């Protein structure tokens, strides 16, 4: 009979290691199971010499292992020593296959060796071990694989590698390395360049391609997998190729299947959901605990604290003061009511509807991300046109919405328990109305990422937000004194639809009459003129489309299709027509707008007859820009190549008005008909870079700019997530000597980004080692003159535009 | 439509017009008005005086002060361009004013001379000023006509990509040269090691690359005796193809450098002449007041 451990800890990352160390110090019988032959594989696989940050810096570390910001090697060395000193019972190369049994007697089966028995199990396996799957048709065929153990295994095959990260490139290089194997290797990259991968890997890839040993297909995605064949979508159209094997390396997400097989329930069906946990990190399966990244905590410090805490909980400690208590205390200090932290948590959770479904543990973490504020009567909470993507929940008191910008006295109340600001959350655009406290009010402000996490974790919260959002959006778009009661009938039949880029929601000539509200993303309107689709207009989020057929009961006059991935709300026509007949004011308003849109269409049609070339030009330029992702931009830098003299003063100005690194690359990027889209941030409505930022350092600023705050830990997730390759990982160069010294004495590197050689020398002279952090355009935030790239352009070639202004019909006149 | 999303903008130049047409040719109008007034006043004054108003007359002083002030201000563009301050300025507006007010100096400066020229420092300052203006006019021509050629030539290829393309072709050449004999390998080596992409400013400006090592290597390759083995023959054919590719890349890169050189070339006259002008102007002013 084998030994039964008190605690088995699976995964030796910061969380698991910290738990094991604490168990060892407490003298508990324990075992730490690690799949590989070293501790903390995720950190181990960081690149050599990487600087690891310790955030949030205010959080106190409570662990038997040490951790401080520093080089990867130093940290791993420290942990190895700590684990040894604590006397942890580690078992390497122990890959867990299944966990069976119940609390007090779990059996942990390994892929190799005898099973292990334990009373309690701590799952600290993180998310790195679970690859993202291909989604196209045929992706479940057996020749699609997500791992490549030995590239030498395969000979004389046509192999496609999907994914442009280091894993994919290294696999592809391995497969193509030996020409004698006779493999025909192709690597697919969904974007134009290999921004995710290390430079050395990309260089090797390009060299292999140039030597003719591999094919590299960029801006290409697989669309259909068949036995022996693959069909891919390229910028030139789709094409079919011989393919015996597909190796997909596209990142990782929580290993849900395995976790669920242990009997653990997840909070929701959303792909980003985490397991449901009690305040003591216990899952729905008693005796199994989940901590670390798998519990939704990607930061090392959190993980290590949880490792300590969970062992305390398993030992039966109930009154452990959480490590984040001082943080919350500070956050809540100065608020009226004299409540203790736990009382505040309960107060907010009970009073704000969308927080009702949270566990106390989730609520605690949630409050770390959020802010609680007290407002005096009539104090503005936010004002119209201010950017902002956070949601507010009303814990006590009530607020009033100024629905009419011309008359602040017309207000609509929102009461206790409800939320506001949710439109900014979903569409990423600026605030639509000013909201003030109607009486002394306490609100919780929830940042966008925390709110999205909440919606993923708690289905009730998601439904509540969706319901309120649809209602408010309809009210806000149509205004005209509508009340929630007026639109209940319309909303009852509303349908929320996800639309793929290029997918049409309305087809020209169809007989259909529903109305569409664009909740997120954007649409383009096209009309077939003389056998060619002609771009008519651009419809941003927060607007509607399809009113002509609804009002006039005529066939559709134009095609409306998604410029980018969008969410639309389909409103059925019949209830809406009844609403129009009840509300003549709304009818009048919509008819006016309809006539305005019709005039634009008629104008373009007439221009098309007289000046066909001008309209074709306008249409093709608009389509080019949409293809460049301008449809999801809020502010984009364009360069008119008929004016650009290539002086790079824009880049120099950018470097000099920031910390010495240019955030734009003028020369790179695509061009069409004199319009050049340089590699520079376009401040997307829904920034891809924000999607996975562990310290939540990427925010939207007061001018709508997406910027990276100084809490960046340099993990590089944003750089990998950006499809436009505008984020770079770099360290700011040392300070240059003043400009006049350069002008008079030639001291220093002069204006603009200093050369690599100068930076290297100056850094050496300075002696200070600084970490590489994410750097991107902040639209010259806080500078009254606006973006320096545009101000510093001597010829007027550089302009910054918003898509709806640039894609407006006025462009037809110009040409 | 767009008001739904509620865009209000910070100071932002979204009007799309070049430096010449800035604000509906505002500075062209200002400069023209300045010249017309100056010419008018000059001839009115001239008709009342016995001889034409020289630099020493009240009108001469006025025009001289204005011109000297303008010259100093125009020279400040070099500083404005490089000092990136946070406030609201537009380099485009500066360039626009620089161009038109600079051109107006032809009239102001000439009237200031009172058409009295001689072999002295005063006329030297005038000549330098005209040289600066002439080179500037060349610059206007370059800025107005060359950008389309610049970007038309490079398409979407960046400078770095052109260099990398040549490097990668060189690597291919090195691989392909493996089966060759000594003489053949020597030809390939010359193409790889001796090819200069750019060269000096004059070479870049004239785009005269008759001595290009790659071109020479292509000629020498064809002159090689027939290779003994089929393998070497095949290698030679492929090497010739790669060299042709390299030639095409080099031609494109060199044309790019030529246009860039043309865009910059006028500055090599404009800037030194400006400094010379500032020196001569100082001498002119000092001498006028010292030797009155």
Image (cartoon, coloured by chain):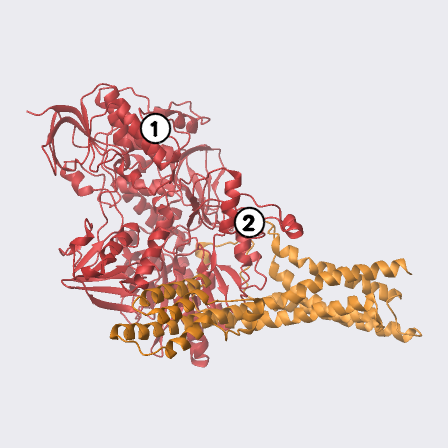
Chain colours: A red, B orange
Q: Nearer the viewer, residue A321 or A388?
A: A321
Residue B140 picture quarter: bottom right
The residue lying at 33 percent from left, 60 percent from top is: A207
In the image, which disc is placed on residue A32? none
Q: Nearer the viewer, residue A388 or A761?
A: A761
Q: Chain of mark 1?
A: A
Determine whether label 2 and label 1 are within 8 Å by CB.
no
Q: Secondary structure at mark 1?
A: helix
Location of residue B110 in the rendering, given as x and y in whole percent from the top left corner: 79, 71
B237 left or right, relative to A32: right
Location of residue A316 in the rendering, given as x and y in whole percent from the top left corner: 22, 19
Let me know if residue A471 appears in the view: yes
A492 left or right, relative to B152: left
Location of residue B57 in the rendering, given as x and y in whole percent from the top left corner: 89, 66
Q: Chain of mark 2?
A: A
Q: Quick one: label 1, few (<14), some, or many (20+) residues within 10 Å? A: some
The residue lying at 27 percent from left, 42 percent from top is: A456
In the image, which disc is placed on residue A345? 1
Q: Are marks 2 and 1 on the same chain?
A: yes
* Residue corresponding to mark 2: A657
A165 shown above or below A68: below
Q: Secondary structure at mark 2?
A: helix
Let me know if residue A351 appears in the view: no
């Amino acid at each position: 009979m084998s030994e039964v451990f008190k605690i088995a800890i699976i995964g030796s990352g910061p969380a698991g290691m910290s738990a094991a160390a604490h168990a060892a110090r407490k003298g508990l019988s324990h075992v730490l199971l690690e799949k590989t032959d070293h501790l903390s594989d995720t950190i181990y696989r960081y690149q050599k010499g990487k600087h690891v940050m310790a955030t949030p810096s205010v959080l106190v570390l409570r662990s038997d292992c040490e951790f401080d910001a520093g080089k990867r090697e130093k940290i791993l060395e420290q942990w190895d020593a700590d684990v040894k000193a604590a006397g942890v019972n580690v078992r390497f190369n122990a890959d867990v296959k299944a966990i069976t049994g119940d609390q007090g007697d779990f059996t942990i089966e390994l892929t190799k060796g005898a099973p292990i028995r334990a009373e309690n199990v701590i799952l600290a396996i993180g998310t790195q071990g679970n690859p993202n799957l291909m989604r196209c048709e045929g992706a479940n065929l057996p020749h699609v694989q997500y791992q490549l153990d030995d590239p030498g295994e395969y000979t004389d095959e046509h192999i496609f590698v999907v994914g442009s990260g280091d894993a994919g490139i290294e696999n592809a290089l391995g497969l193509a390395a030996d020409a004698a194997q006779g493999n025909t290797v192709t690597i697919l990259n969904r974007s134009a360049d290999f921004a995710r991968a290390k430079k050395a890997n990309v260089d090797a890839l390009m060299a292999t391609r140039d030597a003719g040993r591999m094919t590299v297909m960029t801006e290409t995605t697989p669309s259909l997998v068949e036995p022996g064949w693959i069909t891919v979508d390229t910028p030139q159209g789709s094409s079919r190729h011989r393919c015996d094997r597909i190796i997909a390396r596209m990142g990782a997400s929580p290993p849900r299947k395995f976790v669920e097989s242990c009997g653990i329930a997840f909070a929701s069906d959303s792909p980003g959901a985490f397991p449901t946990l009690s305040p003591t990190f216990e899952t729905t399966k008693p005796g199994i605990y989940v901590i670390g990244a798998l519990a939704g905590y990607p930061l090392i410090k959190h993980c290590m604290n949880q490792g300590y805490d969970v062992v305390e909980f398993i030992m039966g400690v109930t009154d452990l003061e959480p490590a984040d208590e001082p943080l919350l205390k500070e956050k809540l200090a100065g608020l009226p009511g004299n409540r203790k932290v736990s009382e505040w948590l309960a107060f907010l959770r009970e009073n704000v509807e969308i927080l009702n479904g949270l566990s106390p543990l989730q609520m605690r973490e949630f409050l770390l991300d959020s802010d609680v504020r007290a407002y005096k009567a009539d104090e503005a909470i936010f004002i119209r046109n201010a950017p902002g993507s956070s949601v507010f929940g009303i814990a006590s008191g009530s607020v009033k919405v100024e629905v009419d910008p011309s008359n602040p006295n017309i207000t609509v109340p929102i009461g206790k328990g409800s939320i506001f600001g949710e439109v900014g959350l979903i569409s990423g655009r600026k605030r639509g109305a000013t909201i003030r406290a109607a009486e002394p009010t306490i609100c919780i402000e929830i940042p966008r990422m925390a709110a999205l996490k909440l919606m993923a974790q708690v289905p009730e919260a998601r439904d509540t937000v969706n319901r309120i959002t649809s209602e408010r959006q309809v009210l806000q778009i149509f205004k005209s004194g509508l009340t929630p009661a007026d639109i209940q009938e319309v909303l009852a039949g509303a349908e929320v639809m996800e639309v793929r880029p290029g997918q049409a929601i309305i087809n020209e000539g169809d007989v259909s009459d529903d109305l569409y509200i664009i909740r997120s993303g954007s649409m383009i309107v096209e009309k077939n003129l003389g056998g060619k689709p002609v771009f008519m207009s651009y419809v941003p989020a927060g607007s509607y489309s399809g009113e002509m057929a609804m009002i006039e009961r005529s066939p559709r006059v134009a095609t409306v299709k998604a410029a980018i991935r969008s969410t639309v709300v389909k409103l059925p026509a019949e209830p809406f027509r009844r609403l129009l007949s009840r509300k003549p004011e709304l009818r009048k308003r919509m008819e006016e707008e309809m006539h305005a849109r019709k005039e634009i269409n008629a104008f373009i049609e007439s221009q098309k007859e007289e000046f066909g070339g001008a309209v074709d030009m306008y249409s093709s330029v608009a389509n080019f820009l949409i293809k460049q992702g301008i449809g999801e931009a809020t502010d984009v830098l364009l360069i008119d190549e008929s004016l650009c003299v290539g002086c790079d003063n824009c880049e120099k100005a950018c470097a000099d008005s920031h910390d010495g690194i240019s955030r734009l690359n003028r020369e790179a990027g695509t061009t069409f008909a004199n319009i050049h889209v340089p590699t520079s941030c376009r401040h997307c409505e829904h920034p891809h870079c924000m999607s996975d930022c562990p310290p939540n350092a990427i925010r939207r600023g007061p001018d709508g700019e997406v910027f990276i705050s100084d809490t960046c830990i340099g993990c590089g997730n944003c750089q990998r997530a950006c499809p436009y390759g505008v984020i770079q990982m770099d360290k700011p160069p040392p300070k240059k000597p003043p400009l006049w010294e350069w002008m008079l004495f030639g001291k220093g590197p002069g204006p603009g980004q200093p050369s690599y050689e100068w930076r290297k020398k100056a850094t050496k002279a300075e002696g200070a080692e600084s970490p590489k952090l994410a750097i991107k355009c902040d639209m010259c935030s806080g500078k009254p003159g606006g973006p320096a790239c545009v101000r510093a352009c001597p010829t007027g070639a550089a302009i910054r535009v918003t898509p709806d202004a640039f894609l407006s019909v006025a462009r037809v006149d110009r040409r | 439509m767009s008001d739904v999303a509620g865009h209000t903008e910070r100071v932002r130049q979204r009007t799309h017009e070049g430096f010449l047409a800035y604000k509906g040719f505002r500075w062209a109008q200002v400069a023209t008005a300045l010249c017309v007034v100056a010419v008018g006043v000059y001839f009115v004054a001239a008709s009342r005086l016995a001889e034409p108003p020289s630099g020493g007359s009240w009108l001469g002083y006025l025009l001289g002060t204005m011109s000297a002030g303008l010259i100093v201000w125009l020279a400040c563009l070099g500083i404005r361009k490089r000092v990136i301050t946070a406030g609201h300025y537009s380099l485009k507006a500066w360039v626009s004013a620089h161009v038109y007010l600079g051109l107006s100096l032809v009239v102001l400066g000439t009237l200031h001379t009172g058409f009295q020229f001689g072999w002295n420092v005063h006329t030297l300052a005038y000549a330098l000023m005209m040289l600066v203006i002439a080179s500037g006019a060349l610059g206007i021509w370059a800025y107005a006509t060359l950008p389309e050629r610049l970007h038309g030539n490079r398409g979407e290829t960046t400078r770095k990509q052109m260099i990398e393309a040549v490097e990668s072709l060189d690597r291919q050449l090195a691989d392909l040269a493996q089966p060759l004999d000594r003489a053949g390998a020597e030809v390939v080596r010359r193409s790889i090691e001796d090819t200069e992409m750019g060269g000096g400013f004059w070479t870049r400006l004239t785009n005269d690359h008759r001595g290009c090592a790659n071109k020479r290597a292509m000629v020498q390759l064809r002159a090689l005796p027939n290779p003994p083995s089929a393998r070497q023959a095949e290698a030679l054919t492929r090497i010739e193809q790669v060299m042709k590719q390299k030639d095409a890349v080099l031609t494109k890169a060199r044309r790019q450098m030529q246009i860039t050189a043309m865009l910059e070339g006028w500055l090599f006259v404009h800037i030194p002449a400006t400094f010379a002008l500032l020196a001569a102007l100082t001498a002119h002013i000092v001498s006028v007041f010292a030797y009155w």
